[in-house]
Amino acid sequence: MARVESFELDHTKVKAPYVRLAAVEEGEKGDIIAKYDIRFITPNSKSISTGGIHTLEHLLAGFLRDELDKVIDISPMGCRTGFYLIKFNVTPLKEIKKAVENSLKKVLESKEVPAANEIQCGNFKDHSLEDAKEIARSVLDQGISIL
């Protein structure tokens, strides 16, 4: 099996919430792709509900693009403890942290989930704005570390 960066992280030694630069790859034409680990929940302690993480995905997809240039994707982790942010170029962690904080503040102000309909979403019935706001509030209250 090829090297998988996230499998090399000792999940017993990290405490969320945090942001870290997980990987940097260079494309054949010199493009730089950065992968950030944006962890909201300490691994193996609990997880975000499927509706909550799905709603956060929809909200962060727009909010993080408003905050940062050249975002490729924001994807939930299968373990439901956070997200991977993929973008062109390396952005200082301090800026990533600020963008996440600003985005989570916008989550708290949100009144609806964008694209939560059967045309734009593959599982539009599985959303929870309440759970998303609870996670956003918890992360902001705890503060985000930089690893």
Image (cartoon, grey):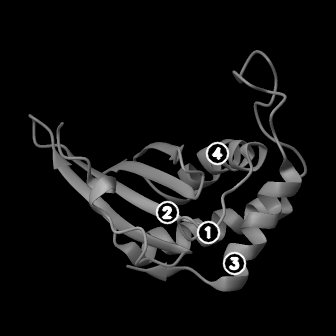
> How many numbered markers are drawn?
4
Q: Position of residue 90 (x, y in %)?
A: 28, 61
Classify 52 as above or below 114: below
Could you say which disc has been placed on residue 45 in the image? 1
Q: Earlier in the sequence, mark 2 or mark 3?
A: 2
Kind of residue sitting beneath label 4:
Glu
Could you say which disc has been placed on residue 140 in the image? 3
The residue at 81%/39% (across/down) is 127
Using the numbered discs, state the Cα–Cα distance from disc 2 to disc 1 in whole angstroms.
Answer: 16 Å
Kind of residue sitting beneath label 1:
Ser
Residue that badge 2 annotates: 38
Question: Is 107 left, or right, of 80 in this rendering?
Answer: right
Q: Mark 1: which secondary structure? A: loop
Q: Position of residue 110 (x, y in %)?
A: 84, 55
Kind of residue sitting beneath label 3:
Leu
| Other residues around mark 3 within 10 Å, as few (<14) / some (14–19) / many (≥20) | some
Q: Mark 4: which secondary structure? A: helix
Using the numbered discs, state the Cα–Cα distance from disc 2 to disc 4 in whole angstroms.
Answer: 12 Å
Q: Position of residue 81 (x, y in %)?
A: 58, 58
Residue that badge 4 annotates: 57
The residue at 52%/53% (across/down) is 83
| Other residues around mark 2 within 10 Å, as few (<14) / some (14–19) / many (≥20) | many
Q: Mark 2: which secondary structure? A: strand
Q: In the rendered image, which quarter is residue 1 located in?
A: top left
Question: Which residue occupies the foreground of this view, 35 or 76?
Answer: 76
